[in-house]
Image (cartoon, rainbow, N blue to C red):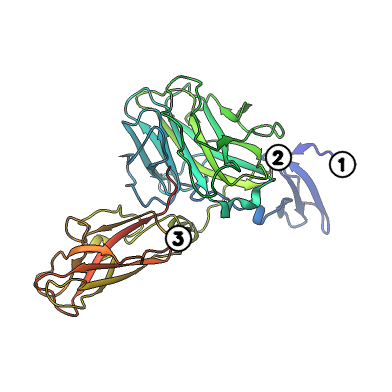
Amino acid sequence: MGYRLTKSAAPNTPAANKSEIYMDTADNRIKAIDDKGVIWTLAEDGSKDRNVLTNGGMRVQQRVATGSTAIPGISTTTRAGQVADRWAITTSVASNLNWAQIDTSGTPETGLLARYYGSIIASTAGKKVMISQFIINAEMAHLRGQKVRFSIKLNQKVGSGQTYKLGLLQLAAAGTVDVSPAFLTGAWSTVTGTDPAWGTNLSPITPDASPTGENGTITGNFLNITSLAAQWQRSSVVFTVPTNAKNLVVVLFADATGGATDNLSISECRLTQGTEIIDWVEMPLALEVMRCQRFFCKSFPLTVVPAASVTEATGGSGASGIIGKAAATALAAQISIQFPVQMWKTPVTLTYFTPTAAGAQVFRLSGTTPAVQTATASRTSSLTDRGVICTATGDVNGAVGDVAGVHYTADAELVA
């Protein structure tokens, strides 16, 4: 037999040596209040509450500037439009779409617990938008055969009438683990009600009928979120992960094209084991940064966008080493670069940037007339998930013992 509780506000503090159990009207949680007035939530608090998603609060943003800026690399078929770390934007029309990271520390927003949020901002009408994150097997294998809840907070800052679909995709058994196929098989249609054509072996997981979706209606393979207003609203839905799923991808996408100035703001994204609705808790910044750096890391400070000609005062010298051979000699500079964390795999793309000058070369930072070095490259077979050795040919004024530096980015994100 079970106990059926009627929801109520927190009762008065019980007498000495007494406690009382109740179901709180405010959040539907079962709680206990003791004789000192301390209220305890009777729920599991531990590994099941861990957010499987990385950077769900849009706090870490290494690639793009924090103000409203055009989304680099955005595509109608891939996840190349990287914004806040681990998050990608895909669109039905790859133009006139911006992203902005907003810091609410100075002006908190009602209903939002996270400090940051991201905004997808249109400057022309007629496009659908989608945000997604690909989850590697090492971070989702324990969820196979389990129920999970995908939760997100949304705010339609500008625009109206849109329906958004919240979903969870799997890379099915026929796929290759930790290898993203082409995200979509063709350009995403602008026709209202036409879902994206998912890539080979990518398929949506049908939400569980019970418990019902939060602030949305389960329709087919997604939770449909309608009548979204200019206020923060949490929507969530439960899925049962197939036992043979190799990877997961969380998605939120528009069902129809939007207006010329639409602004959809997003934060507090969570994927947790179990059916419980879990309030947002910010992960320690150092841990969140490390999780992001496993997929993308750089020599620049966290908030500096990678680019050539970043001054030492702004970006430091990046990775640095000592000139070992004088004058214009091959391999005069050999810089051992150790990534800040062990990346989840060997980076797919390694890019060099010249400090204090244009280009992608090592720069001699000290000695007579500091100058750009030439023939900057990675030493053969030296690139691993731990680091790389960068070499360069010296310049005519170089001397043994001079300091040389270079900036870099290492990218192992799944963008297909």
The amino acid sitting under disc 2 is: Asn
Question: Where does the image place residue 363, in percent across and percent down from the top left?
Answer: 19, 65
Q: Residues within 10 Å of mark 2 (few under 14, many from 20)?
A: few
Question: Where does the image place residue 24, in percent across and percent down from the top left?
Answer: 72, 41
Instruction: Give the label, 2 or 1, closer to the camera.
Output: 1
Residue under label 1 = 2
The amino acid sitting under disc 1 is: Gly
Q: Quadrant of the C terminus?
A: top left
Front residue of this view, candidates 293 and 68? 293
Query: Residue placed at 75% from the left, 51% from the top?
Result: 33
User: Which numbered tag is attached to residue 262?
Assistant: none
Front residue of this view, candidates 376 and 17? 376
Front residue of this view, candidates 342 and 97? 342
Q: Residues within 10 Å of mark 3 (few under 14, many from 20)?
A: many
Does residue 222 appear left or right of residue 351 in this picture? right
The Cα–Cα distance between marks 2 and 1, rounded to whole angstroms, is 17 Å
User: Is 64 rendered above or below residue 321?
Assistant: above
